[in-house]
Amino acid sequence: MKRLIVTTALLLASLSSARAQQFDFRPGTAAAGHSAVAAGSTYSGERGNGFEPGSGGALFSVKVPEGNYRVSVTLGDAKEASDTTLRAEGGRMLATGLTTSPGEFLTRDFIVNVRRPELPKPPPNAPGGSRVHMFLPGEAESHNWDEKLTLELNGPQPRLARLAIERDDRVPTLFFAGDSTVTDPRSGPGGNWPTHLVQFFKPSIALSNNAEGGETSKSFITGYRFDKVLSLMKAGDFFLIQFGHNDSKANWPQSYTEPETTFKAYLRVFIAETRRRGATPVLVTPMERRANGDSVGPWARAMIELAAQDGVALIDQWSASKRLWTALGPLQVGSAFADPTHLSGYGGYLLARLMVGAIRRDVPALAAHLNDDAPEMDPTRPVPAPAYLSQNSK
């Protein structure tokens, strides 16, 4: 399996005067307006671009401020066929099966969100923090928080010809909040439903996954993760909120929430602050664990009740996941899980397919940004794993 990973970023003179940066990876003279990228050009902070040391010419980096970026990727080769899978940042699946014949070139556009852990500094004497609280090893160093826009190209025959990136502040952003059953992977071709859901959206919206392992509806707020989302949120954005797995841990006294009282109270904070900014909150019930019992049922039912009480859009993933795990059966359900609680890449893909249909039914304003051919799935008839899950990624 051949692999090509490209980390790109854009150095802007200012947020209000952003211009497209264009790169040409082909040998020979660069296309007009493009910067030629030599195979041996090593990244340096002073220059602000180049291939990462030790990457064997596979990682290309340029610094970029946080924001949403329109990324135009041209794939193909003058002499060979190509077959490329494209990911961004922490493994977000942008597209798979991008093929070209010898001499053919294909250009596709995507929207990629880049963010940093810093928060706007509070005024003098005002309470608050200046950085998202990170307590799990490896998170601060992940692609999801670094100063680079990261693209990964792999597949049977990846061929990158040209690349253009340009800041786009006009598109809405779809934010995600949640725990380790929602977050993007540190590495590897796995991922939860938001990781796989990205490929089903048009380049008219950015997706920003702010979920992280260990979080609850309470700690997401107290650890400044919610403040980070709110600092970037604008009218017209969407916010999908899924909690329950860690909220149910009574042995975590600083972050546990009781379903009928504190859990609903913290969710109401998410709802009120999102609505105050002109954005749309959407509650997503947590998927059930592998044993397919009722481990998060009380929190899922509390979320369903709250959505009805407060008139909030709801996606009932919990009920759908129970039907899905039943359909897989005791001999196959393990293929959707990495352990009793956490999904494999296949499990994340299955839930992403369920989410497509749920968004179309329950969040029509967000559904307008789905690809017209984005595939749904009946939870009682799970589809096979896609080929890209067996491809390497970093």
Image (tube, rainbow, N blue to C red):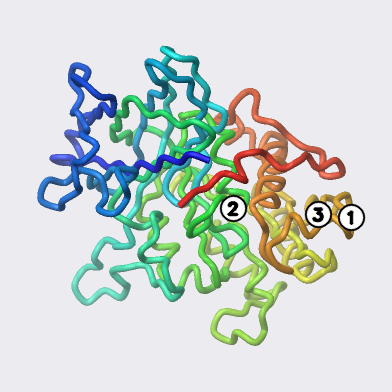
Circle 3: element type: helix
At horizontal 68% and vertical 63% (from top left) the residue drawn is 338
- Residue 230: x %, y % from top left: 40, 56
For residue 230, say whether it is visible.
no
Left or right? Give the position of 250 relative to 154.
right
Amino acid type, residue under disc 2 in the picture: Gly
Circle 1: element type: loop
**Residue behind mark 1:** 329
Question: Looking at the image, is mark 3 or mark 1 nearer the viewer?
Answer: 1
Q: CA distance from mark 2 to mark 3?
A: 23 Å
Question: Looking at the image, is mark 2 or mark 3 nearer the viewer?
Answer: 2
Circle 2: element type: loop
Amino acid type, residue under disc 1 in the picture: Gly
Q: Nearer the viewer, residue 337 or 294?
A: 337
At horizontal 21% and vertical 21% (from top left) the residue drawn is 28
Q: Nearer the viewer, residue 43 or 294?
A: 43
Q: CA distance from mark 3 to mark 1?
A: 16 Å
For residue 181, say whether it is visible.
yes
Q: Earlier in the sequence, mark 3 or mark 1?
A: 3
- Residue 187: x %, y % from top left: 49, 57
Q: CA distance from mark 1 to mark 2?
A: 21 Å
Q: Earlier in the sequence, mark 2 or mark 3?
A: 2
**Residue behind mark 2:** 190
